[in-house]
Image (cartoon, coloured by chain):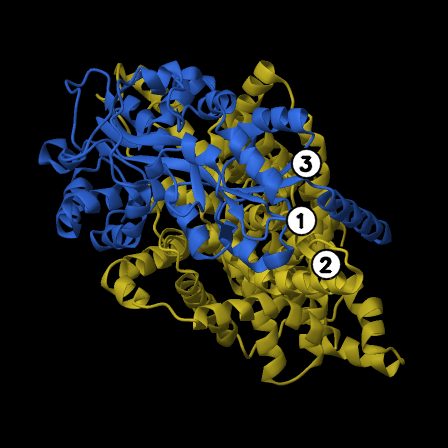
Amino acid sequence: MAAGLTSMLALLPVLSLGAEAARGSTGLWSHLAGTVLLSALADTLVLLTGVGLIAGCLGVALAWLVTAHDFPGRRLLEWALLLPLAVPTYIVAYAYLDILHPIGALQGAIRWFLGYSSPRDFRLPDIRSLIGCIFLLSLVLYPYVYLTTRAMFLTQSANLCDAARTLGVPRRHLFRRVALPLARPAIAVGVSLALMEALNDIGASEFLGVRTLTVSIYTTWITRNDLAGATQIALLLLLIVVALVSFERWARRRQGYATAARSRPMEPLRSRGLRGTGLFLLGAVPVCLGFVVPAGYLVLEAFKRWQFAGLSPRLVSEALNTVLYAGGATVLTLVAGVVAAFALRLSAGRLPALLYRLSTIGYAMPGTVVAIGVLLVVAPLDRFIDGTSRQWFGVSTGLWFIGSGAALIYAYAVRFLAITAGSADAGLARVPRSLDDAARTLGYTAGGALRAVHLPLTRASLSAGALLVFVDCVKELPATLLLRPLNFETFATHLYGEAARGTYEEASIAALAIVAVGILPVIVLSRVGRNA
Amino acid sequence: MRQMLLGLTALTTLAAAGQAAADVNIYTTREPGLIQPLIDSFSKSTGVAVNTVFLKDGLAERVATEGESSPADILMAVDAGNLVDLVDKGVTQPIDSTVLKDAVPAQLRDENGHWFGLSYRARVVYAAKDLDINALHYEDLADPKWKGKVCIRSGQHPYNTALIASHIVHNGAEATENWLSGLKANLARKAAGGDRDGARDILGGICDVAVANSYYVGLMRSGAGGEEQVPWGEAIKVILPTFRDGGTQVNISGAAIAKHAPNKDEAVKFLEYLVSDEAQEIYAKANFEYPVKAGIAADPIIASFGELVVDKTPLSEIVKHRKTASELVDKVGFDS
């Protein structure tokens, strides 16, 4: 019942978009097919493959590094590796574009070192390319994989690794033969989250000149004023994502991942001295590139601005809005995610699975498109309430849902349900069915079992999911811009406003605030993850 | 959790109350901070409060779905195409205001009174300071002598589709396709980023000329966009290009009154205030644009570009060719 309601609420905006797409668009596809469709598809696939490979390998390798090895500074790395999460893709793109530009610091230093006086005489290749985009996105998206995979390594691998050792598997083969296959559901969730983030990115692509299908959606809608056509492209994109995810699920359809034993962290291999330092430095590289460099750049820019103009008093109300709305959306999304995943566990058959899959596709859509879908659902409701009130009481209620920002929280939930549902699903997969049966035999209802058995056992996965949602809401820009009430600012909208008027230095303060708000839960979470 | 819900409920009530008491509500795709001084001065002299929400894409969709319940009074947008989209979506209403008609030249407003330009900008060419060039036709940008030397943002950006649509009006679609292919072949890098990147990339030695909007020069050279942009602005000189049989292409920032505006009278008053001498002086200068009203001077940085000969084609005519322009961009693979 609750599950049905959850899927319905999550699905409604997508369905409205489907209805919009069905209104048809004349000549769009023949135009696209004759021009940019192939190259946009190719760019999209190359981008996804590149980010999937790099972010995936980085995330898994780093998760293994900090769980299977112990070296000086490991505790620090464990949470520091999450920090790039706090940096939105559009900020990392902007920062690196500035740092790596021919007139930027790095190339200036190289020219000085080589004795060239002007960038006209010597300069490095431009970062504005598909390859550049893949690297920059991977730098900030690998934590999705790291986070989900590490949770799995921490809680599941220990017993099985021990068992494998007893059976004579050498330690160096543990990763490939035991831990990696076991972590596959978690890796799949992490990689698909990273891929969807990459897919719906528009800011970084704009800076870096990458023309994916997402860019075609905007062109069709904004430049050619064809919303129906744009939603058709968006639905095509969704098909690609659904196909990818289904393929992965199909590939491991016969495997079970439950573990009955009480989980405990595995015993890491200790390294000291030169080897230990080496391991630390290895793990520190992604932290530096994905966080220290862009955040340091922001600190420097923000400092310049602060000296020049001080802090804007707006920042306080923006902080409140940002945290309150992101927090509210996180709670809502978490509850909905647990309900959706638990319902999937309880039910048999294809329909619930299909519903579950469909209700989480908001994550793969560009934020603005989701926001339009939400508008199509919420605005008529608002109009109905207002109209009824006017008719019966002669008083206008205004727009309840849009005017209060409730529509915004709804949009966040639709957009990010995939994260909490995925985390809950991956967490539940590790709880053996026998525990469900045992709880029911002891007289628990399904809901009671969820509270008493499943939730405590999946706490680590759930808090990981909640963290991701919170940080994502803080960073979210396009839906916030479209659905916010009058006079309502968050850090992200402030940042965009400043960027729109071209005052990037002022924007750097807001950008820094986004990163700072994102860091706090990262630290909190790393503790939860360890103690679970 | 319960406290959070309570907090949210309280906030909801507050927000709804704030909205009901509002006097003029502006939905804008233009950053409202730019006109904050004007809003303050208007509120002070009339006692009418002004609320704003700044949106990016989807302004038309939001107003349309909100329908009769929409609190929006004024819709502000940059680029005539966006204003025409609002009219096409049926979310605007015509205004018969002599004040507005007298202040805004006919080619910069809708003939039926649905939208009015409030300031305008020119699509100009930035050239490296030491480059031996002082005049240029837009058509010349496709000349092979510029091979590997031109920077420009995405061809699908409204600033560029409007320029290309203008080229279609002057030279026809077929010639425009050839022109675009030629321009594409001349690009020094991907058609990406913003207009300011053109100046930065000229300083960085990536290109010699860049197509960009006029006001960015003011933003860069004045340091309004940050100290580090001053050298970008200083690295270039500005050429006001013209079409071979016309003038320099311009575009507007403008406004329309929402169809269901709850406070229409105040809203019209605010627009009329925006075209007053006092406001035009500030409004255009806030973003280094040209004022629409005759006799008001542009900022000195902008005036230093020389005399602007505005192309005579009405904006509403250019907008009609936008779709073809956008399709040509895809056809020649301009952005890929």
Mark 1 highlights which residue? A470
Query: Please, which chain is the residue tagged with disc 2 on?
Result: A
Residue B76 or residue A27, whichever sits in front: B76
Do the dots labelled 3 and 2 sit on one chain? yes
Local crowd size for mark 3, using a 10 Å CA cut-off: few (<14), some (14–19), many (≥20)? many
The tag earlier along the polypeptide, 3 or 2, is 3
Q: Are marks 1 and 3 in contact (CB under 8 Å)?
A: no
Residue A126 or residue B241, whichever sits in front: B241
- Answer above or below: position of A255 versus A261: below
Give the spatial CA distance, label 1 vs label 2. 11 Å
Give the spatial CA distance, label 1 vs label 3. 16 Å
Residue A492 in view, yes or no? no
Look at label 2 and name its amino acid. Answer: Leu
Query: Residue A332: which numbered mark, if any?
Result: 2
Percent across and percent down for residue A175 are: 54, 58
Percent across and percent down for residue B257 are: 53, 45
Query: Residue A318: which numbered mark, if any?
Result: 3
